């Protein structure tokens, strides 16, 4: 089992390298303007859970996940060449609603602020 610090370093490296791969190597139109929000590797290094989001939001979630799943073999092979591990973890992709939720909260707060600044 890997230590917490080592797991974090591996997760960060996978996130950085995967982000670069998506920008430079992937030509799938389903994966345009997709970004990696987080990567979590389990203690046994068997799985890397990758959380993704897109600028357009949840409307593209199924399309993005399908695109990533179809590129999993290529992505895993390319990552295993840059991240040195005895056995590279299997990639599992998940939609991350956090950016959309944060945007919604910001809009609500802006609305409250504008209502509080109106003269009574």
Image (spheres, helix red, strand yellow):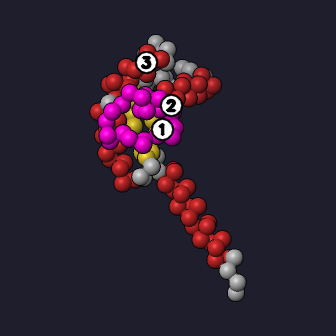
The magenta-colored residue range is 19-42
x and y percent of residue 56 in the render?
41, 52
Q: Residues within 10 Å of mark 3 (few under 14, many from 20)?
A: some
Decide which of tag 1 and tag 3 comes sooner along the chain: 1
Q: Residues within 10 Å of mark 2 (few under 14, many from 20)?
A: many
Any magenta on residue 13? no
Q: CA distance from mark 3 to mark 2?
A: 13 Å
Q: Nearer the viewer, residue 44 or 6?
A: 6
Which residue: 42% across, 52% down? 57
x and y percent of residue 70 in the render?
29, 33
**Tags 1 and 3 touching, CB below 8 Å:** no
Q: Is residue 46 visible?
A: yes
Decide which of tag 1 and tag 2 comes sooner along the chain: 2
Check disc 2 and report the residue beneath it. Answer: 15
Check disc 3 and report the residue beneath it. Answer: 80
Q: Quadrant of the N terminus?
A: top right
Q: Nearer the viewer, residue 93 or 60?
A: 60
Q: Is residue 108 above or below residue 74?
A: below
Q: Which mark is residue 115?
A: none
Which residue: 61% across, 27% down? 4
x and y percent of residue 21 in the render?
43, 28
Q: Residues within 10 Å of mark 1 (few under 14, many from 20)?
A: many
In the rendered structure, the answer to whether residue 108 lies left or right of residue 35 reads right
**Tags 1 and 2 touching, CB below 8 Å:** yes
Q: Quadrant of residue 67?
A: top left
Q: Quadrant of residue 71?
A: top left
Decide which of tag 3 and tag 2 comes sooner along the chain: 2
Check disc 1 and report the residue beneath it. Answer: 36
Q: Quadrant of residue 24?
A: top left
Q: Is residue 3 above or below residue 58?
A: above
Any magenta on residue 30? yes
């Amino acid at each position: 089992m890997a230590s917490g610090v080592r797991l974090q370093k591996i997760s960060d490296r996978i996130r950085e390298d995967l982000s670069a791969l998506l920008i430079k190597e992937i030509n799938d139109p389903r994966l345009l303007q997709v970004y990696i929000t987080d990567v979590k590797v389990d203690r046994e290094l068997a799985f890397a859970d990758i959380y993704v989001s897109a600028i357009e939001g949840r409307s593209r979630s199924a399309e993005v996940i399908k695109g990533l799943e179809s590129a999993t073999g290529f992505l895993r092979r390319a990552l295993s060449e840059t991240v040195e591990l005895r056995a590279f973890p299997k990639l599992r992709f998940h939609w991350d609603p956090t950016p959309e939720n944060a945007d919604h909260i910001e809009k609500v707060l802006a609305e409250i602020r504008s209502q509080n600044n109106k003269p009574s």
